[in-house]
Image (tube, helix red, strand yellow):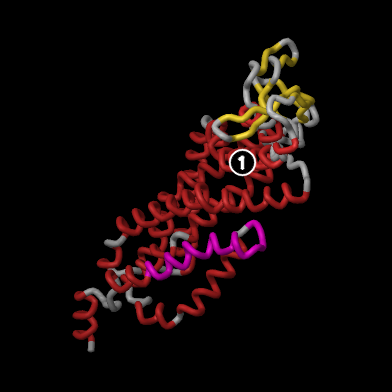
Amino acid sequence: MSFLDHLDELRKRLIHSVAIIFIAFSICFWFSKEIYNFLAVPVQTQFQKAKSRQLSAGNQVNFGEFAENEEVFFSIPQDIVINGQKISAGTIVPVKKVTRDNQPMFVIVKSWVINNQRIAQSDTPIKDILKLGTFEVNNRLVLTTLTGAFTIYMVVALYAGIALSIPFLFYQVWAFISPGLYKHEKKYVVPVLVMASVFFVLGATFAYKIAFPAACDFLLGWAEEGGFQTLLNAEDYLNLIMLIMLGLGIVFQIPTISFILGRIGILTPRMMLKSWRYAIVIIAILSAVITPTPDVFNMSMFMAPMLALYFLSIGIVWFFGKPRRQENEDVTSLVRSE
């Protein structure tokens, strides 16, 4: 193909890619609210855990200073919401000390009424009351602009549309480079697309279930120790979690790329084993770029799976790789011409 033919083919593949993303975006926009709620679960869960730790710390009392059944006033350590009613930090609740199963605790002396609503019955442990209210108002992501909600749903639909289009986008890349491959190399399209899709899903799932919760817990821990009140900006959070999910989804393509290069004879197990030190340096750099914090703990959360994938790729290349060869008909024609 001439240079202009290559440009025309590239334009065709780009148009197809944009059309695919637009169709996926249109579908995902109808479910953008559900997708957004799904993406907000990790940070809300970690935020709830952080608040639970604060409430537990605030409820650590030296019970030896109080006599059995002694009535005292207990101050709520954090803002909480119980039965839809916000209870501000510092609210005074009458309690008394009791011992149950050899465990000292404070229980509510009288029924607790706020805004004409009964919150708790008598003899209810205060720690149970606090646990019920650990889902605080500030667990909700906040917006700082009037158009923020619409923008959020548009961005969610775009990111989700791109993620949904990944198999088709991989096919477009394959269709662009396949004319430069031999016939036997073109047969790899099905395993390549399957591997690329599976490993992308695995990478995004790892980010959603493990990597991001760990990073979020670390960041909230710093805010907790510093005594800061965290307000979670929805736009910043969405960009962060989608960056991590898409980034790890792409990073998890190491086995797929290794499979392709191994099958066409460019990459060998010996080459990968010989270059493992350089691979570790490159993986460390990628982890530092993707990781939202500069600490070693979160960086290792990203490095560990990437290193595992690299050594897994060595096995894939060893099992599936073979020396690069030409088609029989091409070789025959070449011999005859000589």
Secondary structure, mark 1, is helix
Question: Residue 124 appears in which quarter of the rendering?
Answer: top right
Question: Residue at (53%, 51%) from the top-left corner?
Answer: 245
Relative placement, left or right, of 24 versus 146 is left
Q: Is residue 323 above or below residue 46?
A: below
Whole-percent x, y for residue 36 in the image:
57, 36
Q: Depth check: give the residue in front, 182 or 75.
A: 75
Name the kind of residue labelled 1 in the image: Lys
Where residue 79 sits, quadrant-wise, is: top right
* Residue 169, position as x, y percentages in the image: 45, 52
Determine the residue located farthest toward the front in the rendered image. Answer: 67
From where the camera sits, is residue 254 visible?
A: yes
Q: Residue at x 59, y 48 (%)?
A: 241
Which residue ends up furthest to the top in the rendered image? 116
Query: What range is drawn magenta here?
Result: 292-313
Q: Is residue 306 magenta?
A: yes
- Residue drawn at (21%, 85%) of the image: 335
Residue 280 in percent (x, y) is at: 51, 74
Of residues 285 and 96, which is closer to you in this image?
Answer: 96
Q: Quadrant of residue 86?
A: top right
Q: Is residue 232 visible?
A: no
Query: Would you name the residue on which mark 1 appears?
Result: 49
Q: Residue furthest bottom?
A: 338
> Residue 286, position in %: x, y?
57, 66
How packed mark 1 is, by other alpha carbons closer than 10 Å (few <14, some 14-19, many 20 or more), is some
